[in-house]
Image: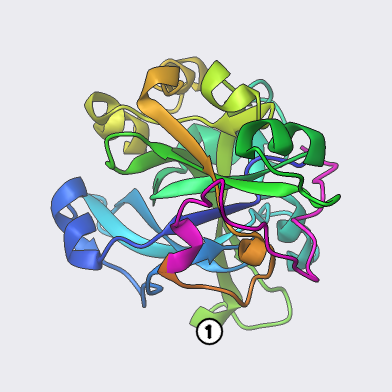
Amino acid sequence: MLSMCGRYASSSRPETLLREFDIDEILGDLPGPDYNVAPTVAVPAVLERRSKSGDGITRRLSPLVWGLVPSWAKDAKIGARMINARVETVAEKPAFRRAFATRRCLLPADGFYEWYSPEASAAVTGRSGAGKKQPFFVHRADGSLLVMAGIYEIWRDPQRDTSDDGAWLRTCSVVTTEATDAVGHIHDRMPMVVPRKSWDQWLSPEVTEPAAALDLLAVTEPAALEAYAVSTAVNKVSNNNPSLLEPLSVATEIEESPAEPPAQDTLL
């Protein structure tokens, strides 16, 4: 099975996110709408940091590279394999535990993609997948944002001077859990979410007890999710437009694509 989640969509405009999350400031250049978010690309994230003077906390909308690079890593390439952090071990695993204790974030998404086996997708779509894994788009049925729980880290390139802002890499991972029935027939994992009532505490750098942070997480109720088949065009990262989110009707032929779905993440 593929590791959830290997692709997602995030197309909200900055001004929408500013209002939705009560942002104090935008830090850095935010990525534009992305309908095929892949590992190692920048994504919009909501986070809180203490001011340098230490007299306040600022809520920021900032780009983070998807694929967490631990502060102790020797090479940033490890991030490509650290896109997800299992909730069962996130508070203990060396790569994630420091971030989970003090650097948590919110990752707003339209929804995420999962790939289903040919036999199973045929049962859902009514057509043979011709040996290809069928992509599905999973989203909130009411059309609202899927606010995924994330953690982030700051890594310094040892080959560059600390005064060079380019020496600092800011990365993130999505916290995942066992899938509910609404997604379980497609895949066994799904992102954890943070309910609106818990946003403040989840983001707060003052909440450092792992148990307290775990209590803030939630699993999206099955009835709140909808999943439908989409074009195999999403298999290719260079395809990136709103049409990727369009439902694949039973009457539509499943497209052939030379690209394979994301490879399994063996670490998580």
The picture quadrant where one finds residue 168 is bottom right
Is residue 52 rendered to the left or right of residue 43? left
> Which residue is found at the position 43% from the left and 23% from the top?
217
| Figure check: 110 above or below 4 | below
> Which residue is found at the position 65% from the left and 49% from the top?
135
- Which amino acid lies under the numbered mark 1 shown in the image of this protein? Asp
Mark 1 is surrounded, within 10 Å at the Cα level, by few (under 14), some (14 to 19) or many (20 or more) other residues, namely: few
Residue at the extreme front of the image, as rendered: 251
Q: Pointer 1: what residue?
A: 164
Q: How is the image coloured?
A: rainbow
The rendered magenta stretch, by its main secondary structure, is classed as loop
Is residue 256 rendered to the left or right of residue 241? right
Residue 239 rendering spot, x and y as whole percentages: 58, 74
> Which residue is found at the position 65% from the left and 37% from the top?
126
Task: Give the camera-side residue of 194 and 178.
Answer: 178
- The verdict on residue 187 being magenta is no
Residue interval drawn in magenta: 243-268
Let me know if residue 3 appears in the view: yes
